[in-house]
Image: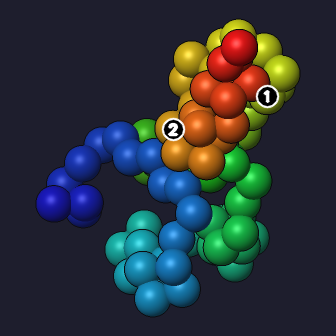
Amino acid sequence: MLSNTEFIIMLKQAKSDLDELSSLFNLSYQQQRQLLNPIKGAGLIRAGNAIVPFSNTVDPTTKLYELITTDPVERHRLRQDVSP
């Protein structure tokens, strides 16, 4: 399924999964390192034959972060901060 797609977003990967992705998409050593321990919101985008790094971080003190975070610990913390 992955080899037939034209667009994929790759985020943090376990070593075993990264080995498979590296083989499938012919990732360089530097690209592999970007998927082993990236910051939240960073990874690689594959569009056609191009593979580019991206970082989409949002300041955690903003309302936008509060709306879009999927981290359950952060969501709980944010709810606690709003409680009277």
Q: Position of residue 78 (x, y in %)?
A: 67, 28
Q: Residue furthest front?
A: 84
- Give me the residue at 79% from left, 28% from top: 60
Res 20 label: none
In the rendered image, which quarter is residue 11 located in?
bottom right
Q: Which residue position is annotated with label 1?
A: 60
Res 70 label: 2
Quarter of the figure that contains the C terminus: top right
Viewer-proximal residue, 24 or 57?
Answer: 57
Badge 2 amino acid: Thr
Within 10 Å of disc 1 (Cα), the crowding (few <14, some 14-19, many 20+) is: few
Q: Position of residue 21 (x, y in %)?
A: 42, 73
Q: Position of residue 30 (x, y in %)?
A: 74, 70
Say whether residue 21 is visible: yes
- Give me the residue at 52% from left, 71% from top: 13
Q: Position of residue 3 (x, y in %)?
A: 24, 62
- Give me the residue at 30% from left, 43% from top: 6
- Give me the residue at 51% from left, 38% from top: 70
In the rendered image, which quarter is residue 75 located in?
top right
> In this picture, is 61 found above or below 56?
above
In the rendered image, which quarter is residue 24 located in?
bottom left
Q: Helix or strand or loop: what does disc 1 sit on?
A: loop
Quarter of the figure that contains the N terminus: bottom left
Q: Is residue 20 left or right of residue 61?
A: left
Badge 1 amino acid: Pro
Viewer-proximal residue, 39 or 80?
Answer: 80
